[in-house]
Amino acid sequence: MLKDITLGQYFPGSTVVHRLDPRTKLLMVILFIVALFTAEGPIAYLTVFLFLGVAVGLSRIPPRTILKGLKPLVVIICLTGLLNLFYTPGTPVVKFWVLTITQEGIFSALFMIWRILMLITGTFMLTYTTSPIALTDGLELLLNPLKRIKVPVHELAMMMSIALRFIPTLIEETDKIMSAQKARGADFETGSILQRAKALIPILVPLFVSALRRADELAVAMECRCYQGGKGRTRMKRLRFAGRDYITLVLGVLLVAAMIVLRVVGI
Amino acid sequence: MEPIIETKQLCHAYGVGTPFERHALQSVDFYANPGEFIGLIGHTGSGKSTFIQHLDGLLRPSSGQVLFRGEDIWKDKQFTHQIRFKVGLVFQYPEYQLFEETVFADIAFGPKNMGLDEEEVRRRVLRAAGFVGLEESDLDRSPFDLSGGQKRRVAIAGVIAMEPDVLILDEPTAGLDPNAREIVLQNIRDYQRAQNATILMVSHSMEEVAANVDRLYVMNHGTVAMTGTPREIFAHAQELTEMGLDVPVVTTIFHRLQELGFDVDPSVYTVEQAVAALEALRGGA
């Protein structure tokens, strides 16, 4: 059923990783990606891997959950691996038909797969340990300097929070409308592509009508509470950097520095 | 008499195999005879909505059976699809499912899905519109221009137009003003009489249930807690209150009168009965 789709895969908890400021986590993801793409050589690869391993361990996210999250990406990962395997020029190892596997190809395929896995798991660490609301809050504060050049940062963040808030509601609504039309004999499962596309009209029209109605009601409710955008608005929960945030950020910067050094030295 | 629809040991679980597994229905036995008006009450989350979606073949039982005229509705795919026309289900706030450009087209959606010819579709739409008291001139209007009560009636007509033998309604009067409520209930009764249809109505209003139904099912925690005539059910005021339900206001008054030492029958549940009982009391005194 539609309800089983999870969006924003927040995994509630109270570990150190969960308690980090969302801004720290956002910055860490950026630093981690930079480190990942500067990394060269086995020592560098191992360091990045260990760094991420420690973060996963501290967050107490079961490895099985992460593996489950990686599942939908298996095809892309395999495809990248295969392409690198066959299309990297170098010393041939195996040759059959028009395909050649080179020594460099094997290394490059393994490296690409490793890099993609690290990249995805790294971003998972952010979305698994940060609630969507905290995430938008963090994003808003990080982008705050852009207000100087008239970017409506608060408004964008508010739109994002509202959108996130309404995803489950709209999924539930879609489910309900689908059942109601099925009860009137609507058929969504058989017929040609054109027929199936047409069968969606009885779902989409009521869904749009209700989404617009909800948006209207929400706008009125917000106006009733004198909402006027970000100007002069204070927060109930203020984000503050704690000692752990500074330590984490220093570690992040050190990681990037180490990667650069390793690359320059060329181990 | 053979029941038109019945369930045997019906069970339904959500999220099987996950830590969130929840048993929404447990061994529900239910039957309805042709022409009966049945009420279904229970507090929010007692499994009413899950239950009625089984009768229509929208949800598949985890175990147990749903029988329509003695045949399992899941025996083959074609039969399940046919059941949706024989058992009409009107969801809560059905006006949110309207989508066509005209009232006529919206009511015709169900009959068209049945594969009827144009002539028959037209006849059914007009008849259904008649049951819910829509004027011919309303049929060409956009359903989105109607009032809330009218939209509700169009949505109900959309199900009635399939001329189901069993009509199930989930809180058909929720959110309507008293006048519109009475009209909707009258429409349902008219349909029942004209078609000798079986009606199953989910409701939170004990007055509404008391005034309309022949028999009642009370659901609690996914099971049938009680079943019987309104008189039998409302005699158990205490148990109903414990389940988070109510009894009609007149029943409460008569219970209280009895406690005060008046010689009255506390199983009164409609205003008419109350008037008669009080007249008798005055006449006797």
Image (tube, grey):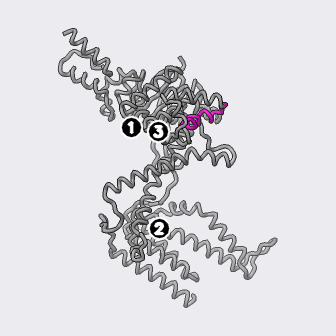
Q: Main secondary structure of the magenta part?
A: helix
Q: Amino acid at mark 3?
A: Leu
Question: Relative to residue B241, is residue A88 drawn left or right?
Answer: right
Marks 1 and 2 in Cβ contact (< 8 Å): no
SS of the residue under disc 1? loop
One can see residue A195 in this view:
yes
Instruction: Quote the CA–CA distance across marks 3 and 1.
Output: 16 Å
Q: Are marks 1 and 2 on the same chain?
A: no
Q: Residue at x 31, y 65 (%)?
A: A235
Q: CA distance from mark 2 to mark 3?
A: 50 Å
Query: Looking at the image, which residue is at 37% across and 30% down?
Result: B179
Q: Residue A261: say if magenta.
A: no
Q: Quadrant of residue A28?
A: bottom left
Front in this rendered view, residue A57 or B282: B282
Disc 3 is placed on an element classified as loop
Disc nearest the viewer among 3 and 1: 3
What span is in magenta? B103-117
To which chain does the residue with label 1 belong? Answer: B
Q: Which mark is residue A125?
A: 2
Q: Which residue is mark 3?
A: B146
Q: Earlier in the sequence, mark 3 or mark 1?
A: 3
The residue labelled by disc 1 is: B175
**Residue type beneath disc 2:** Met
The subunit letter for the residue under badge 2 reads A
Q: Is residue A256 left or right of residue A14?
A: right
